[in-house]
């Protein structure tokens, strides 16, 4: 990782596309995604690691992009909500969220979907307790969570 | 959006180079591994380093390996998730692994490291606030001010020890390896902390926590009980770690460490004396837990009333001992 | 989910089905652009400087250093925005930026526009404000005393009293005299906040003489009016667009400082200006649930009939008026829509304090008295040895009646919702063991406020439907804040036109493009905008049917509509046919509530609604007799929805309402200490995670309201209400202690258990109600029955 002035060069693959970005060392991944790459599907609700709205997958694992510094992720692969869809076809998790009414205002949805995708990739048939655990850092104020649990169960079945 | 203040980010090639940077910058530098503690605190202006020294990329800090004495050495930058998903560690140190699995939320544990959790800053709801909020209050001694807001008569800061893994590690007699300008030293985890919420950690400014060394578990069984308002995200309101060595149904040895009831984790194992040589009996357990909870000094600087947290200390101790000894 | 249908719905094609939301895909793929996601060329970023003092006179503001900072485009203060505003006509008490005095920590005093947020924040820190601190008022009791220096506001009063009311219906003294049993109780409900996942955001442009604001608002129409006032501009030169919305719950219902600031800064700089609040600022903007102290006295007969009720409330309003006059009256208005109270006296007061202003949160002013009333009835039932469900049933209102405070009750499923949850939960035959408890409560809520916030004779909701080359566009001012109002409008129109909801293109919440809908508050959108959409769609259907009938040479009655066809033609063919004949195909619908749904006395504007929903809840929990910790096991919630427009969306609103009720019942509290918000973060302000939320069994009762669109009533707010008292009731059932204060936290339960163990009353809650000099009671004459059939 090199630097130019006060900025650093960050090599990052985002949704399968490689980028070489000139970033501020004190800009979090959240800011880089939303402001430098204009991928505004990644939301923010607290910017302090307390709500889960900004979850993205870094090398496949859900992480809070508001806490991640560019210096920590050089060479990583990042998946955002924009990278979950296959062309115009919804991912089974997205489809299940839609079918089960697992979104209302939709603001927690990108983080919720990404946490769910990561869970189902490592555990295609999670129990309700496992779903709750995996999503427990993602807050939602609209749904009451039940429909999200149903959606993840259903998505797991359709991915099997 | 809450944003970070400006700093430079350095990526040393080795621990030795990191130590070198720390000795050069002193208080103006901070190390970062997962960033889950440091980043929000920098955003709120609680910590304002000029230089942030990244450690997470150093392979030497990311190993889990068996030690010669039958234990394990866990590199400081191993993530909490990696510990939780390690079956060997899970069976050898169930209390420690349980504690690691109860830190915050899954996404945070994917970034957060075991070294970071041992060093996690003390917490206080007069301190874990934005710069503007603290300015409105008039600041406190932990940052920019001169008195302790929760205990104005106190000469020291009373922010709360908030590491879940520290009490569990202490209950297993674990040690940490610190690397500094003068080389490496190994110290008990218990000696890493002191009774001062501001200067809560005893390692020198130029020292880096390199690894956690867990001794051979032998017959020790352990557990950790965390009390909090919610099943995720929250820091401990009370934490109790217990390690027990049984001889049949009799307790041969018992260690108890409590946390979040003052500025440092407290080893209250001496209170377990009445249990030794006996079966775990509800009456003795209650006596032990009551005695062990006595040094707990929760104050009005966290969620829920301190009276309740004090009482929950006893409950958490009882529960941790039962779980460790695998009795109902 | 169980559906209880009282009228056949077999001829409906899309109404009542469980279909996905029409806006789901955009939200699921990350494409939907919320206000903070919007980026216009050359945008500047705004930060507000906020007061560090709870109460202080502003002596001077020096912005020179901030203005000189590189990257700063403009700095404004109260001098630049001198005109006050406020949501209620009677409470025009807010300056966008205060330059005379500040009234809470977080009150804005200046705003900066700069090239980025970092620069704007740095500039804010360079602004020097000289304050003269004043005494800070932090509690209701304190606010009721004469101020030691000066009141928080120089209007209203006396002292820090904002608003008072005192009304009596029927003869309350006589009622108490006839009562064989009288009980008094005191309750406290702590304030809490909406905590929307999305932080408020607004972006403005000023081009030529046209001001445009995109904002995460629930009520673009009221923001539109406020901007016209503050900028003294014709409304025709202002356009307010409700951006896709990341959660409201009432918290985005007022016009806000940051909205005014970005507009002014856009005017000053000629560039787009955006302001997105931090989470901490969202706690300061607040407008959430009022803390309310309550005293209630009820007299009942031997057989448990309520003969008289006297209800007193005192609301902590925080620093500004907001919806406060209405909030205060709501704490007294809806007790009568569930129980037949033949004599009812209400006295209420709202005070100003130096805290973030309170306002409307889901249930606006009614969750607090509902909590008090339901627990109070539980206690009466216990004292007179009557089953609490039976006591309630003996007092339930009947459909098509008039309450003592003149409210018109029409469809009413209160008996049915009770039956549903009581039977499904096995409440009456529950097994008794220490630590396990079940609680029951019921409630009612409005389907939209009967009167607008400002007096006018215009419709409350308006809708235009245009059919162009076969495509259907629906325009309505209603704002989808996540509750699904776009889906409701699309479904209503689709049913009329024989299409699918996704065939209808919705344009909503845009004062430049859509006719007015008053906003997403008071659970009014399905009922009112739904009716407007129904009218417009029905008219369009008639146009298409007539065109087809003419071609088919048959009567319009013979033309079937459905499955994408109008008679034998496809929808597109039919539309083309009609357009060839008529040119532009546009229809309109308007809705205003009928007259006579409420009384004619002063303060009768709060409470009337064209219909009321009914909800019943049973909560099942385990409570730890040592720690007071609660494990929620299950909630049964039955809701009289009138008719579901979209069953999936209704279920979502029920589950969301139950969730929000439980979370605030058990852990949420907007607390203060030393004049400062105690926990302005999502970590320290506790709200439920997945782990705390129990299973919810939802039962929908369809009473098919005669005036609702397809018989529909509200669901956005009602299901929250019974949940909170049901939790308290279940805790009492489990441990034998009363927690007469919300939130019901384990430390409070422990205190009550300790008191009980020491032989004292097993209770946690306020000891007494302060002495308040309410105004003299206005005795309202009975409703003039000759003016209305019921």
Image (cartoon, coloured by chain):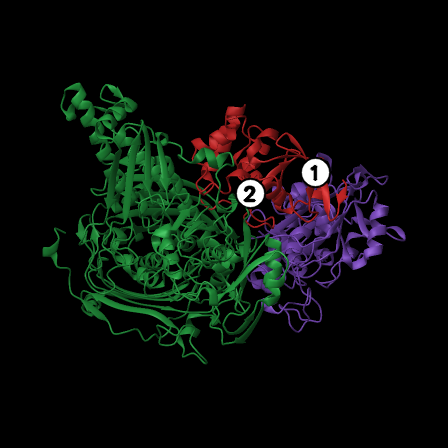
Q: Which residue is mark 1?
A: B82
The chain drawn in red is A
Element class at badge 2 = loop
Using the image, name the chain to which the residue with label 2 belongs: A
B325 over C627 or under it: above or below: above
The foreground one among B108 and C324 is C324
Q: How much space separates mark 2 and mark 1, taking CA atoms? A: 18 Å
Image spot of residue B256 (x, y percent): 70, 53
Image spot of residue B204 (x, y percent): 82, 57
Element class at badge 1 = helix
Residue furthest to the left in view is: C786
Q: Quadrant of residue C279?
A: bottom right
Q: Colour of chain B?
A: purple
Structural crowding at the residue carrying mark 1, measured as other residues with C-alpha within 10 Å and reported as few (<14), some (14–19) or many (≥20): many
- Can residue C335 be seen in this snapshot? yes
Q: Which residue is mark 2?
A: A136
Q: Quadrant of residue C714?
A: top left
Q: Colour of chain C?
A: green
Left or right side of C21 for C403:
left
The foreground one among A82 and C771 is A82
Image spot of residue C658 (x, y percent): 41, 46
- Can residue B301 be seen in this snapshot? no
Left or right side of C442 for B86:
right
Structural crowding at the residue carrying mark 2, measured as other residues with C-alpha within 10 Å and reported as few (<14), some (14–19) or many (≥20): many
Left or right side of C288 for C331:
left
Image spot of residue C755 (x, y percent): 47, 65
Residue furthest to the right in view is: B182
Residue furthest to the front in view is: C208
The foreground one among B101 and A32 is A32
Q: Are marks 2 and 1 on the same chain?
A: no
C50 over C668 or under it: above or below: below
* Number of on-image labels: 2
């Amino acid at each position: 990782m090199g630097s130019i002035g006060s900025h650093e060069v960050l090599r990052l693959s985002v949704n399968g596309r490689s980028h070489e970005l000139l970033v501020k060392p004190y800009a979090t991944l959240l800011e880089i995604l939303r402001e430098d790459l204009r991928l505004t599907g990644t939301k923010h609700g607290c910017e302090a690691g307390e709500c889960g709205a900004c979850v993205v997958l870094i090398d496949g694992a859900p992480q809070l992009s508001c806490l991640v510094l560019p210096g920590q992720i050089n060479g990583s692969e990042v998946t955002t909500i924009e990278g979950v869809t296959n062309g115009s076809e919804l991912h089974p998790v997205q489809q299940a969220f839609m079918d089960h009414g697992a979104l209302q205002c939709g603001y927690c949805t990108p983080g919720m979907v990404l946490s769910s995708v990561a869970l189902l990739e490592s555990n295609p048939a999670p129990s309700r307790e496992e779903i709750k655990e995996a999503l427990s850092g993602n807050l939602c104020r609209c749904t009451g969570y039940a429909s999200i649990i149903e959606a993840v169960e259903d998505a797991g079945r359709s991915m099997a | 959006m809450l944003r970070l203040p400006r700093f430079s980010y350095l990526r040393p090639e080795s621990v030795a180079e990191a130590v070198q940077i720390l000795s050069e910058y002193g208080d103006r530098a901070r190390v970062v591994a997962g960033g889950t503690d440091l980043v929000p605190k920098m955003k709120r202006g609680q910590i304002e380093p000029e230089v942030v020294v990244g450690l997470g990329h150093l392979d030497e800090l990311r190993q889990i390996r068996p030690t010669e004495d039958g234990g394990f050495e866990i590199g400081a930058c191993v993530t909490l998730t990696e510990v939780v998903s390690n079956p060997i560690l899970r069976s050898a140190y169930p209390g420690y692994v349980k504690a690691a699995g109860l830190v915050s939320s899954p996404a945070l544990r994917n970034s957060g490291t075991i070294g970071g959790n041992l060093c996690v800053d003390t917490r206080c709801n007069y301190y874990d606030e934005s710069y503007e909020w603290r300015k409105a209050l008039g600041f406190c001694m932990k940052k920019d001010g001169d008195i302790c807001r929760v205990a104005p008569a106190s000469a020291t800061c009373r922010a709360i020890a908030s590491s879940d893994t520290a009490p569990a590690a202490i209950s297993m007699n674990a040690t940490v390896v610190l690397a500094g300008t003068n080389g490496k030293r190994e110290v008990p985890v218990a000696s890493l902390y002191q009774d001062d919420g501001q200067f809560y950690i005893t390692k020198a400014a130029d020292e880096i926590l390199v690894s956690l060394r867990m001794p051979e578990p032998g017959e020790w069984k352990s557990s950790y009980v965390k009390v909090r308002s919610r099943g995720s995200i929250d820091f401990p309101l009370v934490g109790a770690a217990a390690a027990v060595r049984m001889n049949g149904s009799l307790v041969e040895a018992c260690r108890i460490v409590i946390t979040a009831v003052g500025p440092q984790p407290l080893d209250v194992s001496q209170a377990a004396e009445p249990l030794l040589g006996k079966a775990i009996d509800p009456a003795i357990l209650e006596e032990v837990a009551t005695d062990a909870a006595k040094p707990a000094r929760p104050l009005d600087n966290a969620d829920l009333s301190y009276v309740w947290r004090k009482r929950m200390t006893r409950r958490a101790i009882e529960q941790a001992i039962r779980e460790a000894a695998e009795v109902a | 989910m169980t559906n209880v249908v009282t009228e056949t719905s077999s001829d409906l094609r899309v109404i009542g089905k469980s279909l996905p939301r029409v806006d789901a895909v955009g939200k699921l793929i990350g494409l939907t652009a919320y206000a903070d996601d919007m980026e216009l060329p050359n945008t500047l970023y705004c930060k507000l400087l906020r007061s560090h003092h709870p109460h202080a006179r502003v002596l001077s503001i020096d912005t020179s250093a901030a203005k000189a900072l590189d990257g700063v485009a403009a700095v404004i203060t109260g001098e630049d925005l001198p005109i006050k505003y406020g949501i209620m006509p009677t409470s025009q008490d807010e300056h966008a930026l205060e330059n005379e005095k500040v009234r809470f920590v977080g009150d804005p005093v200046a705003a900066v526009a700069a090239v980025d947020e970092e620069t704007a924040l740095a500039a804010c820190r360079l602004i020097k404000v000289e304050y003269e601190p004043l005494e800070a008022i932090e509690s209701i009791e304190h606010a009721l005393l004469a101020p030691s220096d000066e009141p928080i506001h120089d209007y209203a009063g006396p002292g820090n009293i904002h608003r008072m009311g005192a009304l009596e219906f029927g003869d309350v003294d006589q009622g108490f005299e006839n009562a064989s049993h009288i009980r008094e109780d005191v309750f406290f409900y702590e304030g809490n906040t909406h905590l929307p996942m999305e932080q408020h955001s607004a972006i403005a442009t000023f081009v030529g003489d046209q001001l445009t604001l995109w904002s995460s608002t629930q009520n673009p129409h009221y923001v539109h009016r406020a901007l016209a006032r503050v900028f003294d501009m014709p409304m025709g030169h202002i356009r307010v667009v409700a951006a896709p919305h990341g959660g409201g719950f009432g918290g985005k219902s007022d016009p806000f400082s940051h909205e005014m600031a970005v507009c002014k800064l856009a005017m000053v700089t000629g560039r787009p200006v955006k302001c997105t609040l931090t989470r901490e600022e969202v706690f300061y903007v607040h407008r959430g649930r009022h803390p309310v102290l309550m005293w209630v006295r009820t007299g009942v007969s031997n057989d448990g009939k309520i003969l008289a009720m006297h209800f007193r409330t005192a609301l902590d309003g925080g620093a500004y008026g907001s919806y406060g006059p209405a909030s205060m009256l709501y704490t007294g208005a809806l007790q009568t829509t569930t129980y037949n109270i033949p004599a009812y006296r209400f006295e209420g007061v709202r005070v100003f304090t130096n805290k973030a202003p309170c306002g409307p949160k889901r249930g606006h002013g009614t969750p607090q008295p509902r909590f008090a009333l339901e627990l109070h009835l539980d206690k009466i039932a216990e004292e007179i040895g009557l089953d609490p469900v039976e006591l309630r049933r003996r007092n339930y209102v009947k459909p098509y009646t008039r309450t003592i405070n003149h409210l018109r009750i029409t469809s009413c499923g209160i008996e049915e919702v009770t039956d549903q949850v009581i039977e499904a939960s096995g409440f009456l035959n529950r097994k008794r063991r220490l630590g396990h408890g079940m609680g029951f409560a019921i409630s009612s809520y409005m389907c939209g406020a009967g009167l607008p916030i400002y007096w006018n004779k215009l419709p409350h909701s308006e809708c235009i439907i245009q059919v162009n080359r076969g495509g259907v566009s629906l325009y309505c001012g209603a704002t989808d804040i996540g509750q699904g109002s776009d889906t409701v409008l699309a479904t209503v129109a689709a049913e009329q036109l024989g299409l699918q909801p996704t065939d209808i293109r919705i344009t909503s919440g845009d004062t430049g493009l859509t006719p007015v809908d008053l906003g997403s508050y008071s659970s009014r959108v399905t009922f009112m905008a739904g009716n407007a959409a129904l009218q417009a769609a029905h008219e369009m259907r008639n146009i298409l049917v007539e065109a087809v009938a003419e071609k088919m040479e048959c009567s319009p009655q013979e033309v079937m509509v459905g499955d994408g066809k109008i008679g034998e033609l496809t929808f597109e063919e039919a539309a083309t046919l009609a357009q060839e004949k008529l040119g532009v195909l546009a229809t309109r619908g308007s809705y205003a509530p009928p007259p006579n749904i409420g009384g004619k006395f002063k303060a009768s504007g709060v409470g009337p609604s064209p219909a009321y929903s009914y909800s019943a809840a049973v909560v099942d929990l385990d409570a730890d007799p040592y720690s007071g910790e609660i494990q929620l096991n299950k909630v049964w919630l039955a809701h009289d929805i009138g008719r579901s427009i979209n069953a999936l969306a209704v279920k979502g609103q029920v589950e969301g309402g139950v969730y929000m009720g439980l979370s605030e019942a058990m852990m949420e509290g907007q607390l203060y200490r030393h004049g400062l918000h105690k926990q302005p973060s999502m970590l320290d302000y506790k709200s439920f995670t997945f782990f705390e939320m129990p299973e919810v069994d939802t039962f929908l009762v369809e009473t098919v309201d005669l005036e609702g669109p397809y018989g529909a009533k509200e669901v956005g707010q009602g299901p929250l209400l019974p949940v909170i008292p049901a939790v308290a009731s279940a805790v009492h059932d489990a441990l034998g202690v009363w927690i007469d204060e919300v939130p019901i936290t384990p430390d409070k339960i422990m205190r009550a258990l300790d008191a009980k163990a020491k032989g004292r009353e097993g209770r946690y809650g306020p000891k007494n109600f302060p002495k308040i000099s309410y105004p003299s009671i206005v005795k309202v004459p009975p409703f003039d029955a000759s003016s209305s059939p019921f």
